[in-house]
């Protein structure tokens, strides 16, 4: 993948192995350095010698807050195929992710889903996404739509506050021994479970995070234990994604995420953002090969552990995270 046409083809974002991932990431680094104005200025502000970038940990990671303050594009195009926008409190600046080619997103999403869950058409997919459904351009809603389209199940559906209907649907599908994924934002799953305990042992419950001040903050263990007890399931799955990424991580329990093939997670020192390692505790950096048209190298505001096998867990958010990293560059 050494030229622009090869780099930007959806079928070329899936690496065959770790060596291919590293080569693809380094190719994308040089491509984005020369074709992404914001990333180019950021690297120059850090005095990066691009000829010395030979390993994944050498690559500079752009602070995720730049998606709030700048248009982060590699190359130029007139009309977005997709625009993903983060949620916000009233008056707050939102992140915007401009997507040139929807096929890039769908290729990464479907490949990653199949990697851990198999074909979408095995499942009925129910999405409990209040607040997300009530605003435009939520990447989580688009993710659920794509999976539902590929599932094709007659019982797929979105729910905001139709708890009785959702309860009845889940119970019916469970009684029929159908495979189901209940995808939900955390506060809504807790509210629903509190009001409607039910045996849905055949259902994969997948929480996507997000309390947003809607409930008292619970630990992950408290959330998972409560949902398991109310719904008689053995594990609570989780999805890790964000507006600024096109790839996802998935957890089958205990909040330990595995990366999909288009994604790798690293850890940076909390006091030195240029100190990046493949494992350890600190702030989370992500390489997303699907972000070919924005920026593939994201320094997030999450704090977590990255393990030797490449899996990771999220422990919380940085204090004053919107200010950190931005001081490295003004553009």
Image: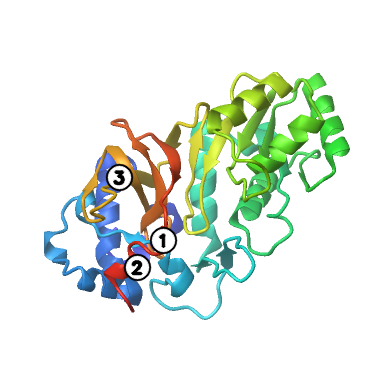
Closer to the camera in the image, 127 or 103: 127
Tell me residue 62's x, y (percent): 33, 62
- Res. 325 in view: yes
| Quarter assignment of residue 19 | top left
The mark that comes first in sequence, 2 or 3, is 3
Residue topped by disc 1? 64
Kindly indicate whether the residue at mark 1 contacts the one at mark 3 (C-beta within 8 angstroms).
Answer: no
Q: How far apart are marks 3 and 1 (CA)?
A: 14 Å
> Quadrant location of the C terminus?
bottom left
- Number of marks in the rendered image: 3
Q: Which mark is residue 326?
A: 2
The mark that comes first in sequence, 3 or 1, is 1
At 69% from the left edge and 48% from the top edge, which residue is drawn?
149
At 44% from the left edge and 53% from the top edge, which residue is drawn?
11
Closer to the camera in the image, 242 or 209: 209
Closer mark to the observer between disc 1 and disc 2: 2
Residue topped by disc 3? 267
The mark that comes first in sequence, 1 or 2, is 1
At 25% from the left edge and 60% from the top edge, which residue is drawn?
60
Closer mark to the observer between disc 2 and disc 3: 2
């Amino acid at each position: 993948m050494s030229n622009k046409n090869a780099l930007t083809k959806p079928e070329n974002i899936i690496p065959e192995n770790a060596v291919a991932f590293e080569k693809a990431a380094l190719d994308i680094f040089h491509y984005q350095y020369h074709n992404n104005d914001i990333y180019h200025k950021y690297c120059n502000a850090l005095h990066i010698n691009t000829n010395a970038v030979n390993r994944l940990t050498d690559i500079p990671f752009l602070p995720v807050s730049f998606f709030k303050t700048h248009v982060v594009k590699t190359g130029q195009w007139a009309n977005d195929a997709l625009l993903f926008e983060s949620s916000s409190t009233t008056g707050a600046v939102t992140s915007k992710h401009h997507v040139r080619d929807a096929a890039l997103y769908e290729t990464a999403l479907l490949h990653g889903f199949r990697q851990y869950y198999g074909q979408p058409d095995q499942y009925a997919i129910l999405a409990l996404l209040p607040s997300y459904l009530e605003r435009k351009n939520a990447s989580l809603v688009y993710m659920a739509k794509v999976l539902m389209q590929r599932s094709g199940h007659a019982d797929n559906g979105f729910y905001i506050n139709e708890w009785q209907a959702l309860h009845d649907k889940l119970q019916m599908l469970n009684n029929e021994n159908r495979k189901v994924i209940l995808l939900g934002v955390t506060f809504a799953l807790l509210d629903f479970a509190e009001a409607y305990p039910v045996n849905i042992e055949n259902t994969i419950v997948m929480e996507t995070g997000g309390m947003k001040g809607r409930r008292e903050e619970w630990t992950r263990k408290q959330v998972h234990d409560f949902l398991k007890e109310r719904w008689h399931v053995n594990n609570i799955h989780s999805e890790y994604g964000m507006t600024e990424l096109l790839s996802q991580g998935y957890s089958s329990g205990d909040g330990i995420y595995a990366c999909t093939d288009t994604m790798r997670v690293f850890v940076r020192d909390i006091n030195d953002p240029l100190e990046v390692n493949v494992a350890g505790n600190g702030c989370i950096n992500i390489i997303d090969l699907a972000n070919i048209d924005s920026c593939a190298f994201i320094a997030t505001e999450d704090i977590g552990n990255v393990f030797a096998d490449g899996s990771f867990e999220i422990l919380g958010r940085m204090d004053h995270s919107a200010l950190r990293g931005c001081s490295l560059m003004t553009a």
